[in-house]
Amino acid sequence: MPTYRAPLDDIRFVLHDVHGVARLAELPGCEEATPDVVDAVLAEGATVCEQVLFPVNQSGDAEGCTYENGTVRTPSGFKEAYAQYAAGGWTGIAADPAYGGQGLPEAVRFVFEEMLCSANLSFSMYPGLSHGAYSALMSHGSDELKTRYLPKLVDGSWAGTMCLTEAHAGTDLGIITTRAVPAGDGAYQITGSKIFISAGEQDLTENIVHLVLAKLPDAPAGTKGISMFVVPKFLPTEEGAPGTRNGVTCGSIEHKMGIKGSATCVLNFDNATGFMVGEPNKGMRAMFVMMNGARLAVGMQGLGLSEVAYQNALSYARERLQGRALTGAKNPDGPADPILVHPDVRKTLLRIKAFNEGARSLAYWVGMLIDIEHRHPDEATRQEASDLVALMTPVIKAFFTDLGFDSTNLALQTLGGHGYIREYGVEQYVRDARIAQIYEGTNAIQALDLVGRKLPMEGGRLVRRFFALVKADVDAAGDDAELEAMARPVGEALGRLQKATMLLAEKGFANPDEAGAAATEYLHLMGYTALGWQWLKMAGVAQRQLAAGTGDATFLQSKVKTARFYMARMLPQTGALLAQIQAGASTIMAPSAQEF
């Protein structure tokens, strides 16, 4: 049976020692989010994840969701777990107190998101979609819509979804055919079908609030003609209770490779009553609030699954006796040595560990930037944070899920044949992790977003801000004898990233295929460099604490040694990635369609 323990020691190290989470309490509205409060909330969140959600993860995967005559039942134990989850206020952890939320910083929810995904990814989808709906309505909904729907989403009695995809229109939302016809009194009649709707139907909440993209009769062509609508499963009464059943039904649920405890639905809208969110034909603006948050959340899924897979692979490697160490028996009184003595097993585990801890530091930094972006009193500081969040969003979504999936595979390999067997649980993490590279915009789309939109945005201002931050830390560490050896490879990786950026700026404008051919490699180049930067930060903190004699020496020495592993064994990937980018598009575009 698999196990999971929230990595609270590492979480605290990153939040307090590396990124200074105490400064969040200086932001307007976050005054009560002191380090002690943050620690207490996350410790309680860890208990919920470990004791309430994790125990129904493997059974939920085995049972899956069931569908009958438009009704969906979630796996056994999910309904009870959700009731306990909502009663604890976790559905509104970062929501506005004006609507019943806890008012905690987004960074705290970001950390909790990682633990949720480790404990039970399928379960996390239900409250995760609700938070996205909350965010979109909070940003673009009218006061009437906020008053009617936000308190219910915040307390968890109602859930939310995002309804974008149609069978003929995946990423190309401009060709959706769902229609919205004015019905008087500010209402619209919504007709059409949506597919791949996570949490589109379930038995956890008394109502579901669908946010639906549709087109008005006179809408312009393409994405400029998309509007967003609230379409509740049950129309609310004047008292705010679920009333008349609306014209939205679940036609079926998908039978999937993974996340089987999450209902992935076909939703049919038949003259369903909806209410516009924001302005006519401006629905994409509202939806991107939800989608950008969802992309960051999906990145945390890659990290969360990698963490729980690592924990179980490490436990197995410590206990599994197989063969003898190449340098002589390390367990002479036993029949064999634990497989952790073997270099290849150690290398595999260190790859996962180095990714997990580096990604955690990068993610929490971005989580704190979100709070700064929305709350800091200085406009220039808010803008800088906004730029960095926008730049890092496709990186976190795609890089974390690509390497997260690789990590779950590596963890399975560590268990050998037992990894392929359901009893040990790791094969579920591989299956669950695979979807994260696909939904909320495939990783190839994220790469195109990075090179096509984020790099040239504001004349390259976003990427220049990132370069400046990394260079400043590399230069500072270069003056430190203890850190110089690690600063050098990070500086070299930054140089490769800057060179690739210039190359894309020169060639990509003249020939878009050049940008398209290099996009995924460029995103990974930025991801490896960003994690190298974070490892440089963490190693610096660890070495200073070791020199001062503070902290857990074993924990801190592990940080330094893992940083050295990352610099020597993972960061060199940036050289190969630059070479692939420099190869250009010709070798990709040369074969004709008939030659494939």
Image: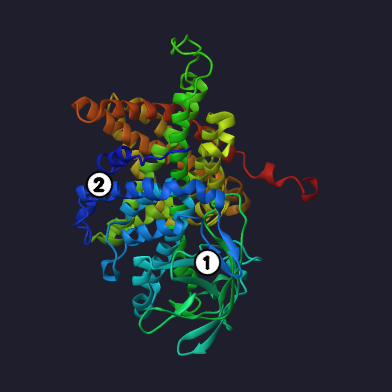
Judge whether 326 appears above or below 376 on screen. Answer: above
Judge whether 456 appears above or below 501 on screen. Answer: below
Q: Residue at x 51, y 77 (%)?
A: 281
| Residue 201 disc label | 1
The Cα–Cα distance between marks 2 and 1, rounded to whole angstroms, is 35 Å
Choose top left, top right, bottom left or bottom right for residue 559.
top left
The image position of residue 261, as x and y in percent, is 52, 54
Callout 2 secondary element: helix
Q: Is residue 133 or residue 140 the one in the foreground?
A: 133
Residue 194 appears in the figure: yes
Q: Amino acid at mark 1?
A: Glu
Q: Is residue 296 or residue 391 the one in the foreground?
A: 296
The image position of residue 152, as x and y in percent, is 36, 71
Does residue 32 appear to the left or right of 305 in the view shown?
left
* Quarter of the figure with the C terminus: top right
Residue linked to disc 2:
39
Does residue 526 appear to the left or right of 422 in the view shown?
left
Q: Is residue 413 or residue 252 the one in the foreground?
A: 252
Judge whether 448 appears above or below 236 on screen. Answer: above
